[in-house]
Structures are given as C-alpha cells and as structure tokens.
Amino acid sequence: MAEHSLILIIVIPLMASCFNILLGLFRRGFCYPLVIATLSLCVILSIFIMDGVINNGVIHYRLGGWAPPWGIEYVVDHLNAFVMTIISFISLFVAVYSKRSVEAELPGRTVYFYTVFLLLVTGLLGITVTGDVFNLYVFLEITSLAGYALIAIGRDKALLASFNYLIMGTIGACFYLLGVGYLYIATGSLNMADLGRLLPDLYHSKVVLVAFAFFAVGVAIKMALFPLHVWLPDAYTYAPSTVSALAASTMTKVGVYVMIRIMFTVFKPNFSAEMLPVTEILGWVASGAMIFGCILAIAQTDVKRMLSYILIAEVGYIVIGVSVTNRMGFTGALLHILFDAFMMACLFMVAGVVMHKTGKTSIHGFRQLHRRMPITMAAFTIAALSVIGVPPTAGFFSKWYLVLGAIYARKWIFAGMLLLSSLLAVVAFFRVIENIYFAPSCHAHDRVGQEGIVRDEAPLSMLVPLLTMAAGILILGFFSGKIVSAVIQFTVPEGF
Amino acid sequence: MDFIISKFNYWIYIVLMMIGFYAMISKSNLVKKLVGMNIFQTAIILFFISIGSKKGATIPIIQDSHVDAVNSALYMNPLPHVLMLTAIVVMVSTFGVAVALLIMIYRKYKTLEEDEILQILRNEKWPNTH
C-alpha cells in the first residue's frame, strides 16, 4: 500500500469517475456520497504522502517497474506534496459545497457533472505526481478537457467562452508539446530529473533555447499569465459556481507549479536567471498582471467577473515571487499558492451562494445582503481583506514575504508594484463591501419593510466548506512559519 | 536553397503550423477555427514523426532476437511515434469536445459565425437599442 500510494492517488479518482456514471444509471443519489468518499480518500492519501516525504525524503514510483530514463517515473518531493495536498483539500471542500448548487444550476445532469468533476481532479493530481514531461502533457490535457466540458454547462455566454478557452488552451498545450519535442531532440530523454542532468551541457544550443521559449509561452497560457489571460474572465464568470470555485483555486496554481518545475527542475536556476533574461521578463509581465488585473477588476459590475480579474492579479503575485529568484520571494510565492487557493475558493463560493439565493451576481445584487446572510458575508469580507493583505489574515503573511523578496533582490519597482496593486485591490473589494454593509437598499419598498428582511442563510452543505475556507484564511497565516520550516524551505531550488 | 530542401519536412511543419495558427486567430467562423486547430495539431504530429526518422533506416523490429548489440543507426527511433499515438488520442478527444460544443452553440444560437453570436448576445443584453 505504502509504496503504491503515488499511483493510487490518481487511479482512485479515475476509477471512481468511471464507476460514478454506472452508479448514476441506477441510483442518482449515490453519486454525491461516492464523490465525497473518493475525495476524502485522496485527502488521506495526500497527507500520507506528505508525511512520507517530510520523514523519509523524496518518494519514487516506477510505473510497470521500468527504470527511470526509459519508463515513466512518478516522483514526489516537498513541492509536489505541497501542491498535491492543497488540491486534494480544496477539491474535497468544493465537492461538499457542490451538492445544492449543482442541483439548482444543473438539474438532471448531476451524474455527468460529478463524473467530469472527478476527471478534473484526477488530471490536477496527476500533474503534481508525475516526473515525466510527456506524461505531464497528458495530464494537462485531461485537466483542460474536463475544464472545457465543465465550463460549457454554465449560463449565458458559457458555450462561447468555453470554445474560446478550448482554442487558447489547445495552443498552450501544443506549444508545451513542441517544447517536449525540442528537448527530446537535444537530449533523447523525457524524464525530468534525467533532463535536469543532461541539459546543463547543452544550454548554448539553440534547440534548447527554443524549447524553453515554447514551454514558457505554453504554460503561461495555461495559467493565464497577464497578456495571455484573455480566456479566463469569460470562462470563470459564466461557469457553474462550483466549477469556478474549483478551477479558480486549483487550475491556475497547478499552472504555476508546472512553470516552477520547468524553470528550476528541468532547467536549472542559473539557466532561467542568467542565460536568458527569463526571470526579468517574467517579473515585468507579472507586474503588468498585478496592475491591469486590479484595474480591470475595479471596472467590472459583475462580482464573479471582478473576482476573475483579481485572480489574474493573484497569478501575477505568485509569478513575481518566483521571478525575483531568492529564498524570500520563492517562499512567498509558495505560501501565496496555498493562501490564494483558500481565498479564491472562499470568494467564488460566496459568489455561488449569492447566485443560489438571489439568482444574480451583479455588484448591486449584494446590497444589504449582510442582513440576509450575515455569516456568508462575513466570510466574504475575511477573504477580501486577505486578498488585500490586511494583517491578521493569511494574505498578509505571503505578501510580506513577496515584498521582502523583491526588496532583497533590489527590485524596488516590483516592491512598489506589489503595494500599488494591493491598494487597487482595496478599491475593487470595497466597492462590494460597501454594497454589502453600507449602501441603502436599492428599492424604496425594501426600505419600508426593512424589519421584514428575514435571515436567509446559505444551506449547511454550502456554509460548512465556506466557513472552513474562511477559518483557514484566519488561522493558516499564524502557522506560516511552521509551514515554511516543515515544507517550503526544502522546495527552494539550489542556488537561491 | 539546399538548407530548405534537405529539411523540407520541417519547413512543411512550420508552414502547416502557421496556416493553422492563422485560421485559429483570424477566422470568425467557429468551424474554421476548429479546422485550423486540427491543422495546427497535425503539424506537430509531422514534426514528431520527422524527428524519429533516419536516412536509410528501417522500422524498429529486431528479427534476430539473440543478437545483443543493436546498431541503432539501422532502425528508426520508435519513441516519438509512440508519443504521437498518445498525442493523437488527446487530439481526438479535444476535437470531440470541441465538436460537441459547436453542436450546442448551433442549437442555442442557430449560427456558427462568432460575430453573429456576439450580436445576438448584445441584443439580449440591451434589447432596446435595435
């Protein structure tokens, strides 16, 4: 069991997804418990793997018993285990949350929804487990295909948004595949660790440079880095609220994980930082993402759309932490991956609750909602303060590391951009918070019957995951020192 | 000139890829975009097949199984071909999802021209402007 845990974490959700559709033929009601059971198993496995990595170091698993450079190898070190644990936790909570929202938004299609949902989780977990660049491509496409299908079943423009995402995502994946091809020409290997050993002698080869360029652009499309983000706002705005919550909190983070793997495991930090001005360019692109993401967020009238633009800015934060190439910045980036997953899940869950209760997500629809749903709105405020970076919340701690990283690297402009973008986020979020707490009700007859506004809180299955996320945001920040010393300090690449 | 002719398969791959890329970016008909995507992916298959081939080499089936040392120059590299089998599966499923999306789009809007769909959506949003 122990040595097979790496493959089990993929096989279990994959088999459950197949089993789910068969089960759905007989009893539709069993699908939801099956999904919860499967994802709980994934959480247990990921904690088990995390524990193994912390105590015994890197875990290797050879598929079919073939030795690494020829066979596919699954490798989990601290970085993989960290991202894997985040994904399995968030997907479990989003699955718990999904029950009522899916029943309301997609009546009669719950069976297929959960089938594809499990496929999406399979793909995400697969990306974090594998140590083979081509295998990673396959999992990237499993994730994306499940993502296209899930986004397409949303409301309004979802179909068109999903199709545009499909076209963009396929370009990204194909660029990644071309990168794999060029690396194969140069080295004859597909194993990440093996590539890391073979490549340093070939850094001056043009083939390797082209491969890196293809990787960088392909992965940047997948994780919606600023100039290549155009597919994201439409896709996440019109997707069903459960899908937005899962995709926003995990898919972009996994993209960042792939970028870190390519830049610092397949290629070495001295290539990414010195041979080409990659980190310099990434830093500028990320600052663009932070500023434009927040400015465009201010311009939106729909809360889900605003959150999508905030997400683009958040990707910018994480990338800027990676791009300054020092210990502080990298630590901040990884902490931000964790905290941002919680914040985005919480914010999109609240948007989903409001959608569920009022049927719309425009900013004006949030007016006076603190009377109807005080707990939900409190959770929204906590997550919003965390995105801004107000001290007791988690977002403050990761931003602290990010700003310190930028200062240690003597990139004063990036530090300034980080702070400026936080200020812009204040404007974006306080437009919503003002509506929730302070704005007078929009209809005159509402004001007359203000006593009559009844508390209409979200159902318990939505409230529990929502509050878990909010509690996580409040508590995790205080444990950031512990997280850094237990896990993150081992993920920092050599030479930082 | 020799540079082009001696590596013509790579040039074809680049040309095909650019045709596909152009179609994906500039065409407003969604089916044409999809066709462009397919051309783009096919170009990548051609690229991978090209990197596996060698001049004067044959298919990688070793007949004398008791021979330990194999002269690799006599056989093509099978690995890129195997990778492409997997990639073709991925591409077919992408195509399947895309076609399913197009069917749903056509059922909903009765057209596959992107600008017409956007026009319909705009009219839905502000019905009084037209």
Image: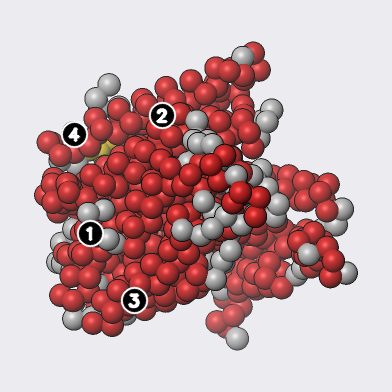
Amino acid residing under circle 2: Leu
10 Å neighbourhood of mark 4: few (<14), some, or many (≥20)? some
Q: Is residue A342 left or right of residue B31?
A: left
Please tell me whether mark 1 sits on a helix, a strand or a loop: loop
Foreground tag (2 vs 3): 3
Distance (Cα) linking label 3 and label 1: 17 Å
Residue of label 2: A39
Q: Are marks 2 and 4 on the same chain?
A: yes
Q: State the residue at coordinates (18%, 81%).
A: A410
Three-letter code, disc 4: Asp
Q: Is A358 or A406 nearer to us in this picture?
A: A358
* Chain designation of label 3: A
Q: Is residue B19 visible?
A: no
Q: Earlier in the sequence, mark 2 or mark 1?
A: 2
* Residue labelled with disc 1: A391
Point out the image quarter for the N terminus of chain A.
top left
- Near mark 3 (Cα within 10 A), the count class, few <14, some 14-19 or many ≥20, is some
**Residue A11 drawn at (x, y percent):** 43, 29
Above or below for A367 versus A458: below
Q: Name the residue rendered at 60%, 72% in the picture.
A: B14
Q: Is residue A388 left or right of residue A121?
A: left
Secondary structure beneath dot 2 equals: helix
Q: Which residue is mark 3?
A: A420
